[in-house]
Amino acid sequence: MTKIETFCKEKGILYKKNEPLVQYTTLRIGGEAAMVVFPQEENIREILEIIKNEGLSYYVVGGGSNLLVSDRGFKGVIVNTKKMDSIRLERYTLKVGAGVMLGRVLAFLGKRGLSGMEGLIGIPGTVGGAVFCNAGSFGYEIKDCLEEIELIDEALSIKKLKKSEINFRYRNSGLSENVIIKTVKFVLKEEGEDIFGKMKEFLIRKRETQPIKENSAGCVFKNPEGTSAGFLIDKAGLKGARVGDIIVSKVHANYFINIGKGKAADFLKLMDMVKERVFKIFSVELRPEIRFLEA
């Protein structure tokens, strides 16, 4: 038994060995991980310390959106944050664990008439992932009401960063891939209007323009300056283009849908095909927004 297994057993931390990763991503793609471990906020640092001391590779996964996992899986440890799920509200300040699903946070705020994040409705994944990618929609970005994050850095030190100390930009927080967000603090405001009504309106609009009920990872490519990737892909005649069971959405061309038993290899081939066609027609190089986890 490895040290990490022993520690998990002693602390009652859930873990699984040789676990298929298909169920851990919104794309429903991916081979097996050697181990998936589910720490809580109070013991994630210890878990990471053991992983580091054992010389194991690891990767943090929340809701699994914006992620393409290799068909060969991952030989290291997947650290899944879903047990890091605390929610604490003090007046207008909300502190949440990085593993809380964004949709749960929005429902929580809607019931209390607190505004600032309603435009993020329909974005899959966790708070930690949304902050790391600076998720946004309808003119809202998650950084807008963010006050502070607590993270574990590469040296396994716990640090707090104010928003002003984070280099937020379009779909990017500027945070290193090697840091792990532990908790996030937001400051909201009271709203006289019906928050749920606004969320419903945004969600209807999103359903009309995005395939949010399909197996996708969200937007595949970042928007080039001055235009949108979806517009370019559409105008290149690529809606409906297909490799294996991966297809360019006919609703929004910057979404690739897994319509059955899609493979990561097919997804990557389709990405290359789309990039080449768009560059040939428009001389614009599309850059990936999606992250790829290799074996």
Image (cartoon, helix red, strand yellow):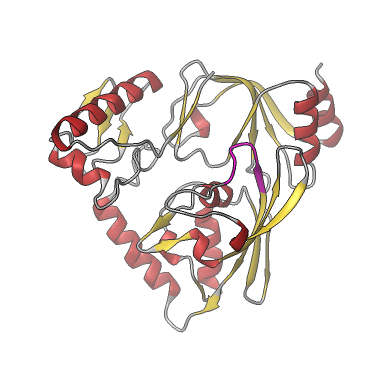
Q: Quadrant of residue 154?
A: top right
Residue shown at 43% from the left, 70% from the top: 196
Q: The C terminus lies in which quarter of the figure?
A: top right
Q: Quadrant of residue 284?
A: top left
Secondary structure predominantly adopted by residues drawn in magenta: loop
Q: What is the span of residues highlighted in magenta in the rendered image? A: 175-181
**Farthest residue in the bottom direction?**
192
- Asked if residue 150 can be seen in this view, the reply is yes
Residue 83 percent across, percent down from the top left: 68, 44
Residue 111 percent across, percent down from the top left: 53, 71
Count how many numbered circles sit on residues in the image. Answer: 0
Residue shown at 84% from the left, 29% from the top: 7
**Above or below: residue 195 compared with residue 166:** below
Front residue of this view, candidates 94 and 112: 94
**Above or below: residue 237 compared with residue 265:** below
Is 179 in the magenta? yes
Residue shown at 42% from the left, 77% from the top: 194
Front residue of this view, candidates 223 and 39: 223
**Above or below: residue 253 compared with residue 226:** above
- Asked if residue 250 can be seen in this view, the reply is no
**Farthest residue in the right direction?**
10
Q: Quadrant of residue 27?
A: top left
Q: Decide if residue 137 is on the left or right side of residue 274.
A: right
Is 263 in the magenta? no
Front residue of this view, candidates 77 and 197: 77
Residue 250 percent across, percent down from the top left: 20, 40
Residue shown at 20% from the left, 34% from the top: 278
**Above or below: residue 120 compared with residue 26:** below
Q: Decide if residue 212 is on the left or right side of residue 175.
A: left
Q: The N terminus lies in which quarter of the figure?
A: top right
Residue 68 percent across, percent down from the top left: 44, 30
Q: Decide if residue 41 is on the left or right side of residue 61.
A: right
